[in-house]
Amino acid sequence: MLLLFDIDMTLTSTGGAGMRAMKAAVTRAFGDRFVPGEVPFAGRLDPLILSDMLASSGLEATPEQLRQVRVSYAQILSEQIAQGDCHALPGVFALLAHLTGELARRPDLTLGLLTGNYEETGRMKLRACGIDQSPFAVSAWGDESPHPAPKRADLVPIAISRDAARRGRTLSPERVIIIGDTPHDVDCAKAHGCRVLGVGTGHSTPQELLARGADHALPNLADTTSVAGWLLSAPGA
Ligand SMILES: [Mg+2]
């Protein structure tokens, strides 16, 4: 079984620091030619958020400017989360501790990350929230889609193939579970026949995530017994 956790508003909250830092990074590069608008962030890939922010101000960035914005974003995020309200969401520490304990008893179990974050800033958020990253044996990050028009769904086969390289065989899709807080998490799982646990700690309610197609949804991850019980009882082999 492969459990793939989203980061923002599933495991962690940065209190909006991620959004503020990305806007500040674009402002640092483009000055007042950049007019921060209403670009959706939740559940989306960082490179897409960035390109939408630029497009909303009619800006075109060179690859070097995009690289510089990404560097600035990490610098600014680091400063913001040092002084901000970065925390793990309810039940996350206990759930990850429980699942990490299960790794020793269940050789078939892999924990992983599937997130729209760039790797450096995704890891920064987890570190700032005190989450041990060592149990996550596979990951797929927001800039890893091989396609010119990247989608979150592109990350699912990447995570599955990395897991397959470790275990020596490819899991059937129903043995792969995405845990996330947005309709994008549900959609990316369903695009590949994977299962989804929706978590209502972001903008979507459990009912909305169920209506979108989640197999199960909860207000948060606080009930360790119930969450772990559901996650570890996936069908198939
Ligand atoms: Mg999220």
Image: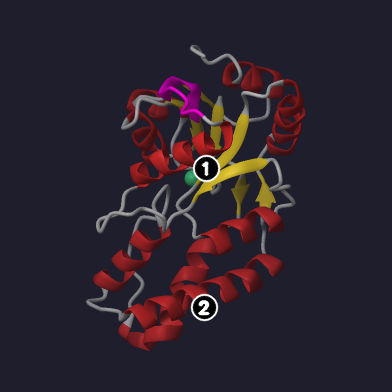
Q: Quadrant of residue 66?
A: bottom left
Q: Secondary structure at mark 1?
A: loop
Mark 1 surroundings within 10 Å by alpha-carbon count, few (fewer than 14), some (14 through 19), many (20 or more): many
Q: Amino acid at mark 2?
A: Ser
Q: Nearer the viewer, residue 99 or 180?
A: 99
- Residue 171: x %, y % from top left: 47, 25
Q: Residue furthest front?
A: 168
Q: Which residues are magenta?
A: 169-177
Q: Residue furthest left?
A: 58
Image quarter of the N terminus: top right
| Residue at image location 34% in from the left, 30% down from the top | 192
10 vs 131, left or right, is: left
Question: Label 1 CB, ligand 1: below 8 Å?
Answer: yes
Q: Is residue 16 visible?
A: no
| Residue at image location 47% in from the left, 73% down from the top | 70
- Residue 29: x %, y % from top left: 41, 84
| Residue at image location 37% in from the left, 67% down from the top | 50
